[in-house]
Amino acid sequence: MSLIVQKFGGTSVADAEKIRTAARRAIRAQQAGNQVVMVVSAMGKNTDLLVDLAGQVCQGGGEPPAREMDMLLSTGEQVSVALMAMAIDDLGAKAVSLTGGQIGIKTDSSHTKARIRSISTDRVRKLLDDGYIVIACGFQGIDDDLNITTLGRGGSDTSAVALAAVLGASRCEIYTDVDGVFTTDPRLVAEARKMDRVSHDEMLELASLGAGVMHSRSIEFGKKFSVPIHVKNSAVFTDEAGTVIGPESESADRPVSGAALTRDEARLTVRHVPDLPGTSHAIFSRLASENVTVDMIVQNPGAGGTADISFTIPEGDLKQALEALQATVDQLGGGEVSYDADVAKVSIVGLGMATQSGVADRMFRALAEEDINITAITTSEIKVSVLVDRHRMTEALRAVHREFELDKPPHERASFGEPAAPAMVADAADVVDRLQHMEELTIHGVELDPSQARVSLIDVADTPGIAAEVFEAVASEGVLVDMIVQSVGEQGHTNLSFTVPQGDVERTITTVKRLMDKLGGSVSGTNHIAILTVTGIGIRSHTGVGTRMFEALHEANINVDVISTSEVRVNVAVDAKKGEAGLTALKKAFADVIEQ
Ligand code: ASP
Ligand code: MG
């Protein structure tokens, strides 16, 4: 008998009628021959109201104690599960509601942002076998001392996917108030289209870019434990509706699947810091110790043995980050700090990008055509992100969405059937082993690519269209560009570095030189680099990955030349002679979390 997990978000249980509608849906699934576990969020905006109440009783200006916050917030879900069980009972089926603690959802003790350690399945299985619909409180768990914990706002998605994983559910359905996952935010771009499918990796990138819908950590679970996630609108009754988040992308022959906008970020730049081992480590470990989450990191070689590093942070952390950065720069003995609080990040994401060239330059051209300037770029295998002026952000997003025809359904679409059952691990010992580390960071691998060369353009004019011209010219020579990073240079100038296959470096330099009359600045290239990549799951939610990587390279006395980061990988370019040593150092640094 197959098992389904159905999760209902706050809007889908906002009133008595909606609760009854959800109850009927679960009963129908049970009548169709499935065992059903429901995971329910607090009704409507109840969690917000509780947060607000906590603020009202704490007038001293301090934060309420985190343990008590969890005690309070967990009540929202307790109300909805009890009501759901009553509704099901009233409709003539059997139901039992359970809190996180009653199920045995064990977490660590970091109140308000706890991570799941393990989940017991005995009680739930017994109830399911006895014909009950089991209704679980989302968002909550219990620590070793029986304190109630919560998983962070929006955490019910994570509870649902985690339960689906441990129970070996055939799928996890997420009922919400939108029709599924869209190619971009439909409130900003009217042509946004609902996708039928999106891959775990694409969704991870999109979710981290702020494309709402799902809690990022739930997607990490989905990927780690191969759970297909089906996002649906609770007001729609057909079964084909919604979006399946699974191993496959909507179309393999399409380079871009979605586009996203991240506002509320600020860019910090430090120029002319000594280009020595340990510089990036000093900067990012200091920020990490201040709990500032760093998003996009771009490092470029600057003039005369110095480096330029730009990165983005949440705008609200700007003051704190600036102070921390200035202090580090003083310690390092040089560098100019500047910032821009008026930026927005526009990103394109697609699995197809990994196997197609000419994607980034199409994006750059689309922006150039709108006369929108790009101030920073990072690329990863499946994502290109650029920073633009915040007042042009919506135009930028629309231009990109149009360029890649995201409003049109892909031609070749995989047939839409029942999502495949997850490949659950058969060995019981293996299951237990995995569950003990449910939310630990998983690193799939540390790799060394010695075949790339770097080309750098230093202090070229910072005007719209530069990136488009450079990468179109390089593409017209048939050269495949891999990693691209652009950062802020001398006043009104910018630095742009990218990697190409070693055999193509001379040809690329000659091509780019032809453009230099117009662009100004200088071009240089080196064959002597190696790229080190760390790939895995949880790279964003475990913010220490970059820091751990920089620390390991620092200890091995290896200088970091170029950096680019994404949700599922961090790439750095280092001196070719240090490639092997870097690989060894990183393997050692991540040995405890490398998946066997
Ligand atoms: N009720 C919690 C919140 O509002 C958890 C959730 O809805 O996922 O954040
Ligand atoms: Mg929610």
Image (cartoon, rainbow, N blue to C red):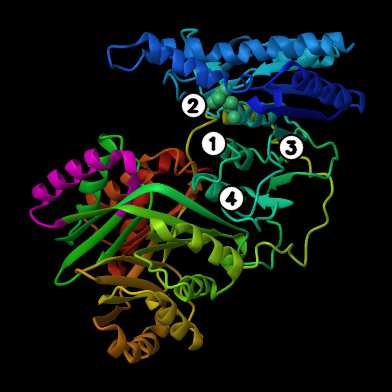
Dot 1 or dot 2, earlier in sequence: 2
Please state the extent of the stretch shown in magenta in the rendering: 311-336
Residue 185's disc number:
4
Residue type at numbered disc 3: Asn
Dot 3 or dot 1, earlier in sequence: 1
**Alpha carbon separation for disc pair 3 and 1:** 21 Å
Horizontal relation, residue 244 to residue 146: left or right: right
Tell me if label 1 and label 2 are in contact, CB under 8 Å. yes
Residue 55's disc number:
none
Horizontal relation, residue 4 to residue 477: left or right: right
Across and down, in percent, residue 24 comes to: 85, 22
**Does the numbered disc 4 mark a residue whose Cβ is under 8 Å from ligand 2?**
no
Q: Tag 2, which secondary structure?
A: loop
Q: Tag 1, which secondary structure?
A: helix
Residue 152's disc number:
2
Horizontal relation, residue 239 to residue 384: left or right: right
Q: Which residue is mark 1?
A: 217
**Alpha carbon separation for disc pair 2 and 3:** 23 Å
**Does the numbered disc 2 mark a residue whose Cβ is under 8 Å from ligand 1?**
yes
Observer able to see residue 530? yes
Q: Residue at x 54, y 65 (%)?
A: 400
